[in-house]
Image: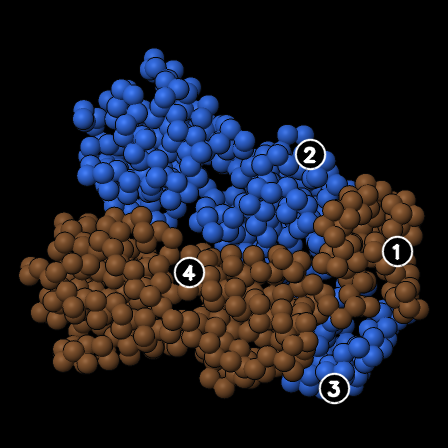
Chain colours: A brown, B blue
């Protein structure tokens, strides 16, 4: 241990004793690493590594050390320790909204990767508010976090990403891109994915196909709309402005737009939806109007969420690789933290069409 | 600023300069609070408060200070600062699984409360693994977090809660109780809530009612099953072991159990489900089997998730007050942090029945 590290502990103990009378019992005892090391017959270095969850220490040894430390009331103080080490063990993750199962599925796979590396993950929603996203980045900088994985808020300027990077917060983007941000990006190939769904409907005989949901303010929304338009035009089909219903991004919004969709000019026979949530909401709205989705109206989703397969009818949709996106983003960030040179790649994960019951031959109403 | 605080900064700067060559540019400049204060004509105390997001500083002043600080490359280091202040600004939240919309709705309301108090929230899933929950509590202690809100993992011993409390981590429980933990608990009145759903089905004329989902290993599962049994017995109805299908807690599991439920002895005409997720999955499974849920079989849910109202058919369910649970738990924790004496109350939020389309008169198959 260096002089500086001892100073860090001393300072902490002084302050704790001064200002946290409730914690004095534990912390003022000044339990030393060597107390634990001697008791268990391991080195102080092993104790230190085990207490900060280093993967260098075998699992059972680590558990034995942590259990012993907990029993004698030793609390390893990561704040003091992080002043001496180059890693805080914290990675920030910020997305639009964790209540959206699309992000929840990405988060689950990020969590799986970070768990294996014993990183703690600090989560925030930005609800597409730039200020909220900036506050979170500030907090991570203040905590000395190791890095951030973000699905950037609508309108995120490249400067915000650069600011994080320049202040020592390696950044990886998921699901959405930021023009000019020179960092790794992992997302699905949206234009290609939506063309799979659109071409599937065209091959069933549909020619009047609406596009429902999404927004031009995100790369995802723009790319999916472009992909739909391109697929229609490639098949020589007309794209009518009245068949586009931008906006919906939730089940509720998909449900609410069903009336307008069913009343649209020239009665489209099918709907390509921006997401599974919108598609499932729309199907519920169609059913509420007395029609049978999948028979009277064909509907496709996007994402292949877990519930797509068990919806009524089972949803034809585009698998969007969200687990892959989360896994690869976490891996590349961990690689960067371990000192690997990582090019600012833009990785597009290739989507796949999953055909189920919600799409069939066109039926005139 | 005290001597200790200066030491903290000095130590940090030394280490940063030594070990983070990449960060030297920013941190080695030793920008002082007074630089910012002088430039903006405010006191150094105001700058310090603003940089740690104190609500004592007016919003526009705070934003002006943070923007200026960001522009000149000043990063407020919360780790160093938290050695001098009694609050880290971090609150931990641990639940079974954020992918479950029940918890997501609770988290959203916790987040709303914490945001207003400028607390950062550190989130973890425990997936009902005690070891994972313990690791998270350890991490919070290491970070010097201010408190924790937890929906305890199955089998959490009271000692784990006591350990957190005794080490200066005030704890509030949500959704589930821990016997012997002497801390505030906020949850719905499960026995009463399920009796509302069961009595509703009985009043429609059902006498063969199954109970689907949940587990005896949580207070929630036990209380809901007891409430169902009590309601049946109060009405003089038989409770058959074959009509209980414990286990399912997800949409997928509800979907998969539909076959067994439909084949159950004496053909129950209705199902009281442990949650909306299970009920929606079950309805999809019933529909897949060619029957119409809400007409051929009555189904009730529990929680009144956002999607209950837009399901097909719209789900009759029990509003479980999850937003209330989150809001009150966050408030009481903030009160504790602000020094208020809070009794270890056990607050049961009164559920309400919301009747929709999924429940009707019994139909013999």
Q: On the rendered structure, is A47 left or right of B113?
A: right
Instruction: Give SS at disc 4.
Output: helix
Q: In this rendering, is residue A43 above or below B25?
A: above
Mark 4 — residue? A102
Q: On the rendered structure, is B87 left or right of B95?
A: right
Instruction: Give SS at disc 1.
Output: helix
Tell me which label, 3 or 2, sits earlier in the chain.
Answer: 3
Tell me which label, 4 or 1, sits earlier in the chain.
Answer: 1
The residue lying at 27 percent from left, 73 percent from top is: A195
Discs 4/1, front:
1
Mark 1 — residue? A44
Q: Which mark is residue B25?
A: 3
Residue B239 makes an appearance in the image: yes
Specify whether disc 4 shares its chain with disc 3.
Answer: no
Q: Which mark is residue B158?
A: 2
Residue B318: % across, % down: 38, 36
For residue B4, what is the image quadrant?
Answer: bottom right
Q: On the rendered structure, is A139 left or right of A306?
A: right
Specify whether disc 1 shares its chain with disc 2.
Answer: no
Q: Are marks 3 and 1 in contact (CB under 8 Å)?
A: no
**How many other residues sit within 10 Å of disc 2, few (<14), some (14-19) or many (≥20)?**
some
């Amino acid at each position: 241990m260096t002089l500086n590290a001892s100073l860090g502990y001393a300072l902490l103990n002084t302050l704790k004793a001064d200002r946290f009378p409730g914690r004095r019992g534990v912390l003022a005892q000044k339990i030393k690493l060597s107390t634990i090391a001697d008791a268990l017959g391991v080195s102080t270095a092993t104790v230190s590594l085990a207490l900060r969850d280093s993967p260098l220490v075998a699992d059972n040894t680590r558990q034995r050390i942590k259990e012993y430390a907990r029993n004698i009331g030793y609390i390893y103080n990561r704040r003091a320790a992080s002043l001496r080490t180059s890693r805080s063990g914290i990675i920030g993750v910020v997305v639009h909204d964790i209540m959206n199962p699309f992000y929840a599925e990405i988060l689950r796979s990020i969590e799986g990767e970070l768990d294996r590396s014993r990183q703690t993950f600090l989560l925030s929603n930005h609800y597409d508010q730039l200020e909220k996203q900036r506050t979170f980045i500030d907090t991570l900088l203040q905590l000395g976090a190791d890095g951030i994985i973000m699905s950037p808020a609508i309108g995120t300027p490249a400067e915000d990403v650069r600011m994080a990077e320049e202040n020592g917060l390696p950044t990886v983007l998921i699901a959405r891109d930021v023009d000019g941000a020179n960092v790794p990006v992992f997302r699905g190939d949206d234009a290609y994915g939506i063309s799979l769904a659109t071409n599937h409907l065209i091959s069933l005989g549909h020619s009047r196909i609406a596009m429902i949901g999404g927004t031009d303010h995100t790369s995802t929304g723009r790319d999916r709309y472009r992909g739909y338009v391109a697929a229609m035009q490639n098949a020589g089909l007309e794209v009518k402005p009245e068949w586009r219903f931008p906006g919906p991004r939730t089940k509720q919004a998909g449900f609410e737009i069903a009336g307008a969709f069913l009343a649209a000019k020239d009665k489209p026979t099918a709907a390509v939806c921006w997401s599974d949530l919108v598609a499932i909401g729309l199907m519920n709205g169609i059913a509420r109007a007395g029609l049978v989705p999948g028979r009277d109206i064909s509907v496709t989703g996007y994402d292949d969420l877990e519930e797509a397969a068990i919806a009524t009818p089972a949803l034809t949709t585009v698998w969007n690789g969200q687990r892959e996106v989360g896994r690869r983003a976490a891996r590349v960030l961990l690689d960067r933290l371990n000192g690997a040179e990582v090019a600012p790649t833009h990785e597009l994960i290739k989507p796949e069409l999953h055909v189920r019951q919600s799409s069939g031959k066109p039926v005139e109403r």
